[in-house]
Amino acid sequence: MNTGSSKWQAVRRSRLFLVVALIGLVIGLVLMSINLYGLTQQIRKPGLGVTDQEQLRFVPSEVWSYEQSMTAIEQLDTSLPVSDLVGEANAVVNQSLVHVEWLKVNPLEYRQLVPIWENYFVWAVGKFSGLPQFERYHFANYKRSIRRGIGICGDASMILSSILDNQGIENRIVSFGGHVIVEYLDEGGNSYLVDPDFGVELNGSLQHLVETPSNFRGAYLEAGYAPREVDDLFAAYRTPFALYDDTYHFMTKRYIFEEVSYVLKWIFPLFLLIVCGAYLFFRSKALKHD
């Protein structure tokens, strides 16, 4: 009786392992197929900034492609004084993003809900968790943000901060209640502000902005922004602010999750294919031998 029972349990375990291996193999194949399909897709909405201007807030005179933006970043003139280099980088970021009405546009159409073929981990969290920051996702990686081509002040500031970090320029992200900008230090240790979302350079420090915000209105008006738009902006500048050393500090948990998930989206299906495939292969050989 014990011998028969043990054999039956062994058979059941073998069948269970077979089913699990087959399911794992199918999941691995599906996920790897999704990844490979994603390599053929563009995360940027077709016609962005051209056919949908009524849904946008700020649209550059020409919406640059990802390749144009990255080329411009790579060709930044590092021989320039820091203030001029930052000004160039600020203009590139402003030209690279279309500012959408973040909470009003269709999250599927504008890829705010990251597509399953882009990253199925981020997609799943956005689809099923109910977390608003994943339902309309802000990329931590500046290249992914430029590739998608949309953003608001926080996205633009994270991109600029990342570019300045790569250039060795000391900077930090300044987050007010409703607007985000970047502060940097020039060669002499002087502090200046830039607003990549509006594409404006502010000739002064954070302390000056807080103490005498009216002195900075002219920079926005000269850039062509409407007085009402500037009024709304400066209402944000009268709110408390927080300082962040870099993009990692600005969104630590999502930064880590994003970077890890973009690696795991390839490792996980590869692991399933190798382990489950190996089990099925050696099981088949064992059965033939028996």
Image (cartoon, rainbow, N blue to C red):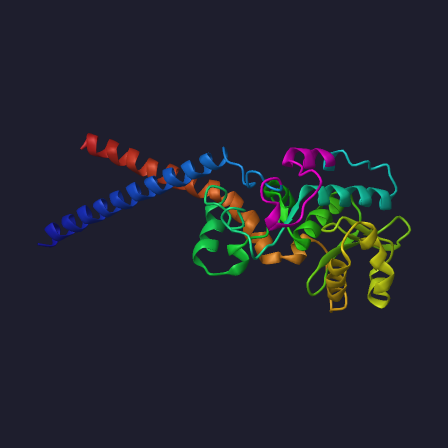
Let me know if residue 131 is in the magenta part: no
Position of residue 146 in the picture relative to residue 195 (left or right): left
Work out which residue is located at the far left of the displayed protein and give it: 1
Q: Is residue 103 visible?
A: yes
Position of residue 276 in the picture relative to residue 48 (left or right): left
Position of residue 253 in the picture relative to residue 181 (left or right): left
Work out which residue is located at the far right of the displayed protein and give it: 188
Image coordinates of residue 193 in percent, x first then y, are 81, 55
Identity of the residue drawn at 47% across and 40% down = 266
Position of residue 222 in the picture relative to residue 58 (left or right): right
As rendered, which of 108 and 21 lies closer to the eye? 108
Q: Quadrant of the C terminus?
A: top left
As rendered, which of 178 and 186 lies closer to the eye? 178
Please tell me whether residue 80 is drawn above or below residue 224 in the rendered image. Answer: above
Q: Is residue 184 visible?
A: no
Place residue 168 in its image quadrant.
top right
The segment highlighted magenta reads 50-72
Identity of the residue drawn at 59% across and 55% down = 102
Please tell me whether residue 72 is drawn above or below residue 139 in the rendered image. Answer: above
Image coordinates of residue 107 in percent, x first then y, are 51, 51
Image coordinates of residue 9 in percent, x first then y, are 18, 51
Q: Quadrant of the N terminus?
A: bottom left
Place residue 242 in its image quadrant.
bottom right
Number of numbered discs: 0
Place residue 227 in its image quadrant.
bottom right
Let me know if residue 62 is in the magenta part: yes
Image coordinates of residue 62 in percent, x first then y, are 69, 38
